[in-house]
Image (spheres, helix red, strand yellow):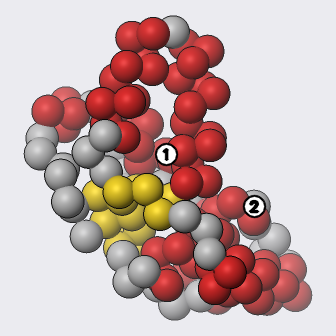
Amino acid sequence: MYLFDTSAVIDWLYSKRLGEKIDGQVSISVLSLGELLPAAKKKGNKTLNTLEKFLNNVQKIPVTEDIARLASDMKYKLIKEGKEKLLFDIMIAATAKINRLKLITLDTDFDAIGEVMQYDYEVIQT
């Protein structure tokens, strides 16, 4: 099973893969949901409807205390190594690690996070 970050969801929605079956294979963090909805609403009903259709077919994973604690530890380690990254990205990586999911992203910031937090991820190129 996969965890799509925000960039992967956006790529999926605007690619030819949109029609492919994803039921039961893809999940997202509720953090990504919080990023995606305002942008879709701003673009209009067609974009919002497309996003909602996608969201109906994926599991939404909440942020738990375990995720927040792991993300906090990783944020601290990244700061110490001079590789500070966005807390949202670190929390999404922590979500993947704790739930044993492969993170799919287009964001190369996850490479630096992966150097500190060992988790399964793939940075895809479009």
Identify whether 46 is placed above or below 55. above
State the image coordinates of residue 43 (x, y, percent, origin top left): 54, 13
Identify whether 29 is placed above or below 44. below
Residue 12 in sight: no
Determine the image quadrant of residue 26.
bottom left
Q: Looking at numbered disc 1 in the image, what kind of residue is underneath it?
A: Ser
* Residue for point 55% across, 36% down: 36
* Residue for point 26% across, 45% down: 57
Badge number at residue 86? 2
Contact flag, marks 1 and 2 (Cβ < 8 Å): no
**Quadrant housing the C terminus:** top left
* Residue for point 18% across, 52% down: 23
> Label 2: how many residues lie within 10 Å, few (<14), some (14-19) or many (20+)?
few
Identify whether 7 is placed above or below 54. below
Q: Looking at numbered disc 2 in the image, what kind of residue is underneath it?
A: Leu
Q: Is residue 112 left or right of residue 33?
A: right
* Residue for point 21% across, 33% down: 18
Q: Is residue 68 left or right of residue 32?
A: right
> Label 1: how many residues lie within 10 Å, few (<14), some (14-19) or many (20+)?
some
- Which residue is tagged 1? 7
73, 27: nearer the viewer: 27
Label 1 secondary element: helix
**Quadrant housing the N terminus:** bottom left
Which badge, 1 or 2, is on the more N-terminal residue?
1
